[in-house]
Image: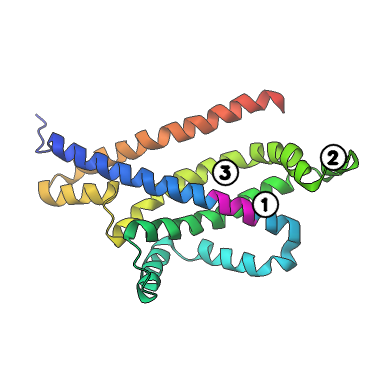
Amino acid sequence: MFSTALTWSDLAFLAQGAGMTLAVTAVSVAAGTVLGILFGIIRFQFGPYWSAPLTFALDIFRSVPLLIQLVLGNALQSIAKMGWPPFTTSCVVLSLYTAAYCTEIVRGGIDSVPVNTRRAARSLGMSWWQDMRYIVAPLAIRVSLPSWIGLTLGVMKDSALVLWLGLIELLRASQILVTRLQEPLFILLLCGAIYFVISLPIARFGRYLEERWSPND
């Protein structure tokens, strides 16, 4: 018969870790999305030549493993004596990491809008801002949403790497319990189930929006 030494306080400890995972993910995705929209518009508007320095910087964040970025980011802020806590360092690095991928998602979404559609909008007297807001944005969001949902879920899973900076998020909390209780299989299964539970609403929400918008295409 199955038995476990896991207590309600241990479950609360895992819940606190899950809360930290959600907090890091929410801050990083929100900041990374804002930066990604800004960088994506710059990349599309100014072309590959003038946006080359920005493209090169973003390629670094896409190419270097996230764990190395976290370690280097923590070391650099320590050398610069910024005094950031691990949560701030984690969010800054993850935000830039998210922005690097979100930039290409946004650029691709804008690029998917037919040129003739934009020309028609401008011929009607729309300004650049009105064209972007009323014509480009609604069409680009539909194209970009599935990739953005996938990026959000990926960042949530990648946030487990912040344990190397000392944050007790969900995976680190489960490792602490495994070390103390010596029940690795059950605790890691429980950890995976929690990841699934907190990820499912995001995936379902993305699917709901796709199904809601599809009849209007």
Q: Position of residue 193 (x, y in %)?
A: 30, 36
- In the image, is residue 129 above or below residue 57? above
Q: Residues within 10 Å of mark 3 (few under 14, many from 20)?
A: some
At horizontal 28% and vertical 49% (from top left) the residue drawn is 171
Q: Position of residue 197 (x, y in %)?
A: 35, 33
Say which residue label 2 marks: 121
Labelled pair 3, 2 in contact (Cβ < 8 Å): no
Name the quarter where the C terminus is drawn: top right
Mark 1 → mark 3, Cα distance in angstroms? 12 Å
Of callouts 2 and 1, the N-terminal one = 1
Say which residue label 3 marks: 147
Of callouts 1 and 3, the N-terminal one = 1
Mark 3 → mark 2, Cα distance in angstroms? 27 Å
**How many numbered dots are placed on residues in this image?**
3
Q: Amino acid at mark 1?
A: Arg
Q: Which mark is residue 199?
A: none
| Helix, strand or loop status at disc 2 | helix
Indicate which label's residue lies in the foreground, 3 or 2.
Answer: 2
Q: Position of residue 164 (x, y in %)?
A: 30, 61
| Helix, strand or loop status at disc 1 | helix
Residue furthest out toward the right? 123
Q: Which mark is residue 107?
A: 1
Q: Amino acid at mark 3?
A: Ser
Q: Is residue 85 magenta?
A: no
At horizontal 61% and vertical 54% (from top left) the residue drawn is 103
Mark 2 → mark 1, Cα distance in angstroms? 19 Å
Work out whether residue 189 can be spotted: no
Q: What stretch of residues is rendered in magenta?
A: 33-39
